[in-house]
């Protein structure tokens, strides 16, 4: 039995991140968006109090919480107070899954406000997997881990990133949130073939895609989430889709947020690529 079938994870179609400039548009009838993703921490201030702000959207959309603060790879223990509040928010939203990043983001109780890569070793994979299993069991819902973009490599790494990512998911028995743009960014920065990465992932564990824009700085590529998706990422996405089953997709945009119609057109383009790639794969 696959991860998705075991947890009865639905296919949600194409969605967007919920951002304040688009609130009025998303509350209009027939907005044309199937689901929304929110940053978990934005609604955790007072337990379930601040999450009530999502009520008008929760009446219309499935809402998936996506975290940025678990810091699964940190030497620090998991923040039990954070998890307690997160669980209240998740229980209120009743999502089919929740997610965070395969990274470390703090040390000694200090948050670095960055999603930093890990050394890719079997010992660290086991260490992170233990934390992920605890989180998934504590929250009581399917948990997805997202691959981050990276700009440095560790001399202590014993395997490529994709092998580490797959190993963690198998050891933790969790799902994957595959960020296609992050794969492209890391592939450019570290000079590997992005399809080598993607084809190495366990097909039954990929539940969600992130697609976003980046900045090409010439000597490196920056995952910025403040530009439209680039053609090379669209091409990589088209190659990715036939490799997996039904996977929900969303467009990420966190800065220089365009008008709703522009971002929705980008989401619709993603859905067109997804549908065409599925059709071509079965032709």
Image (cartoon, rainbow, N blue to C red):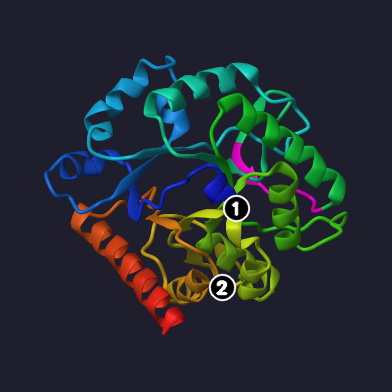
Q: Which quadrant, please, contains the C terminus?
A: bottom left
Q: Earlier in the sequence, mark 2 or mark 1?
A: 1
Marker disc for residue 218? 2
Q: Is residue 12 above or below residue 52?
A: below
Q: Nearer the viewer, residue 31 or 283?
A: 283
Front residue (pair 81, 152): 81
Residue 90: name its quadrant: top left
Q: CA distance from mark 2 to mark 1?
A: 41 Å
* Tag 2 secondary structure: loop
Taking the spot 85% from the left edge, 50% from the top edge, the residue there is 122
Image: magenta residue range: 113-120
Residue 142: image location, x then y, percent: 55, 39
Identify which residue is drawn at 69% across, 74% down. 192
Q: Position of residue 43 (x, y in %)?
A: 40, 26
Asked whether 103 falls inside the magenta stretch, the response is no
| Residue in view at x 63 percent, y 44 percent | 174
How many neighbours does mark 1 have within 10 angstroms: few (below 14), some (14-19), or many (20 or more)? Answer: few
Residue at image location 75% in from the left, 53% down from the top: 167
Q: Residue furthest bottom?
A: 283
- Secondary structure category for the residue under label 1: loop
Circle 1 sits on which residue? 2
């Amino acid at each position: 039995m696959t991860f998705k079938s075991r947890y009865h994870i639905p296919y949600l179609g194409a969605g967007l991140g919920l951002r304040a400039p688009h609130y009025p548009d998303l509350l209009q009838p027939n907005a044309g968006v199937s689901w929304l993703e929110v940053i978990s921490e934005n609604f955790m201030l007072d337990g379930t109090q601040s999450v009530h702000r999502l009520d008008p959207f929760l009446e219309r959309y499935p809402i998936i919480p996506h975290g940025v603060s678990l810091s699964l790879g940190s030497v620090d223990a998991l923040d039990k107070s954070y998890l307690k509040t997160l669980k209240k928010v998740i229980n209120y939203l009743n999502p089919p899954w929740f997610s965070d990043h395969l990274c470390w983001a703090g040390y000694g109780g200090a948050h670095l406000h960055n999603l930093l890569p890990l050394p890719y070793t079997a010992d660290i994979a086991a260490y992170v997997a233990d934390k992920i299993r605890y989180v998934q069991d504590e929250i009581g819902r399917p948990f997805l881990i997202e691959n981050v973009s990276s700009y440095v490599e560790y001399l202590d790494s014993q395997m490529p990133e994709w092998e580490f990512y797959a190993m963690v998911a198998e050891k933790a028995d969790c799902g994957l949130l595959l960020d296609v743009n992050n794969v492209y960014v890391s592939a450019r920065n570290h000079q590997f073939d992005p399809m080598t990465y993607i084809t190495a992932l366990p097909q039954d564990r990929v539940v969600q895609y992130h697609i976003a824009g980046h900045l090409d700085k010439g000597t490196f590529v920056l995952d910025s989430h403040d530009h439209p998706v680039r053609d090379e990422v669209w091409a990589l996405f088209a190659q990715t889709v036939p490799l997996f089953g039904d996977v929900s997709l969303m467009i990420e945009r966190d800065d220089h947020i365009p008008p709703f119609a522009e971002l929705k057109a980008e989401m619709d383009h993603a859905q067109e690529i997804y549908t065409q790639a599925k059709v071509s794969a079965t032709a």
